[in-house]
Image: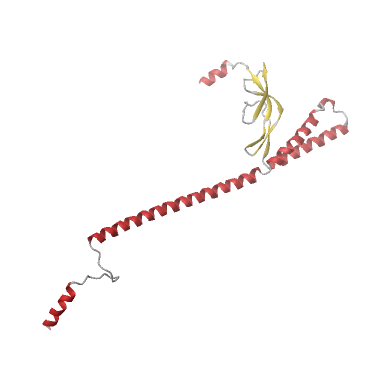
Amino acid sequence: MIEDKDEMAPETAGAVPANDAGGPVEDDAGVTTADDRLVALETELAEAKDRLLRALAEAENTRRRAQREREDLQKYAIAGFARDLLSPVDNLRRALDSVPEAEIGDPKLRGLLDGVAATERELLAALERHGVKRIDPKGEKFDHNFHQAIFEAENSGQPAGTVVVVLQPGYVLHDRLLRPAMVGVAKGGAPVPEADSTDDAA
């Protein structure tokens, strides 16, 4: 039996140890290469994760942008139609203003004007139900976002920049301007009372 072991020794002495997969066991250099591969895989995984997060963020931004556009489309879809109705509304008001109240003696004329006034009210109410509101800024501070100054009025008794005359009312659809109000604006103005100045200072 001793002789058999001696005979087998030369055969096994030069054999390379095998790993579980049947391949050779890596030496120190092989371990370093495996670490490099692990680092490379981790880097690639991090880059893939970053790309995925960016793609998800872009998809979410696109979804939100599409939702805003859809909401705006629904909200302002009637803008053109509403703008076309402003002229008929103006004409109804002109018809009412064309006959002074003191000159209305005929009951038939009174009934006609009452019908025109009712039509104006119903039309304005219908527009308001859909988000269209009239801008009638008399006595308010001039706002270039919603008002268009046609002239300046001197000696109006109002502080400078106050709307003293509304030549044509404006309209907004929700928060979007359909037509600016055409106005006359006070130039100069009445002096501020001393009492008001004292209160402001206090």
Task: Please give left or right for residue 3 compared with residue 135 in the image.
Answer: left
Would you place residue 122 above or below residue 21 in this image? Answer: above
Quarter of the image where one finds residue 165: top right
For the rendered model, the colour scheme is secondary structure
Identify the residue at horizontal 67%, vertical 31% (top origin): 180
Reply above or below: 61 against 187: below
Residue most toward the bottom?
Answer: 1
> From what the image shows, is residue 144 above or below residue 21?
above
Q: Position of residue 171 (x, y in %)?
A: 68, 34
Q: In which quarter of the image is residue 109?
A: top right
Residue in the image at 34% along x and 55% along y: 40
Q: Which one is nearer the viewer's eye here, 115 or 38? A: 38
- Between 189 and 16, the residue placed more toward the observer is 16
Q: Is residue 71 left or right of residue 11?
A: right
Q: Where is residue 184 in the image (x, y as percent from the top left)?
A: 68, 23
| Quadrant occupied by the N terminus | bottom left
Q: Which residue is drawn at 65% across and 29% down?
A: 147
Determine whether 28 is above or below 143 in the image. below
Looking at the image, which residue is at 38% across and 53% down? 46
Provide residue 178's location: percent of width, then percent of height.
67, 36
User: Residue 28 location, x and y as percent?
Assistant: 22, 60
Along the line of sight, which residue is nearer the eye, 42 or 79? 42
Label count reads 0
Residue farthest left in this picture: 2
Within the image, what quadrant is residue 149 found in? top right
Instruction: Name the side, left or right, on which 171 lies relative to 58.
Output: right
* Left or right: where 130 falls relative to 24: right
